[in-house]
Image: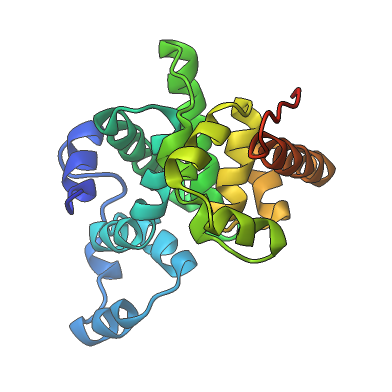
Amino acid sequence: MGRWPAGQIRLQLGAGGANPVPAHQERSATDKALELSEPDDAALLRRMAKGDEAALDALYARHAPGLLRYLLGWGNDRAEAEEILQDTFVAAWRAAGEFQGRARVRTWLFAIAQRQARDRHRRHSLEIAPEAELDQLADAAAGPEESMLEQLDQDELAAAVAQLSPRQREVLALFFVNELSQAEIAQVLEIPVGTVKSRLSSARHALQARLKPGGEVSE
């Protein structure tokens, strides 16, 4: 996964990019260097809204790995996931000026990625693949349930995860692998927090049951 987003987006949006920065808005080299040192995500979006491709590259470098890991859960084909990732950053580039700060930028990006993946899923009937994200579930140990997962063989865990419903796999991936809070998952999936809690509880119980000899639980 290389540093391609700005160039690819130029191709999709047309030469010259979107919202080029007028000459009178150009900052000094010193100001730009200071802002580039450790800009927060919101600052990067503000710069993107003005057509700053370096800000897009910085945001991509910061969040693309986690987003790609999430998107791989929507299909076994890495090329397909990378196409959706590109669509996600194209959408983020176009909507940068609309970001209102009601959620973290990371959560906002996951929500865009989720919508892009669902759109692709509807068009091409892709199935959510359990291995891509949830084979890392055992690395997210934080309590008794996760300690049990840590001790499992990866093949055994993948087999158990494969038996879960797509909704259960998705919520587990967002919570354990991508480390989103329940409130952030609710924003990404556009569902109430209470629904997130119930899906998490159901997914945990279902996974535990399937990891027991002969265990089988309905969705």
Q: Position of residue 202 (x, y in %)?
A: 77, 37
> Residue 177 at x, y = what percent?
52, 53
Q: Is residue 81 above or below residue 52?
A: above
The C terminus, quarter of image: top right
**Quarter holding residue 40:** bottom left
* In-front residue for pair 147/96: 147
Identified at 26% across, 78% down, the residue is 32
Residue 185 located left or right of residue 111: right
Give coordinates of residue 30: x percent, y percent: 23, 87
Q: Foreground: 177 or 107? A: 177
Compared with 108, 59 (above or below) is below
Q: Is residue 50 visible?
A: no
Residue 81, percent from left and from top: 33, 33
Residue at (43, 59) in percent of width and height: 45
Residue at position x 66%, y 47% from top?
Answer: 185
In the image, 66 versus 137, the foreground residue is 137
Which residue is located at x 43 percent, y 36 percent?
131
Q: In the rendered view, tell whether residue 141 sits above or below residue 158.
A: below
Query: Is residue 153 found left or right of 208 in the rendered image?
Result: left
Identify which residue, 15 or 83, lies in the foreground: 83
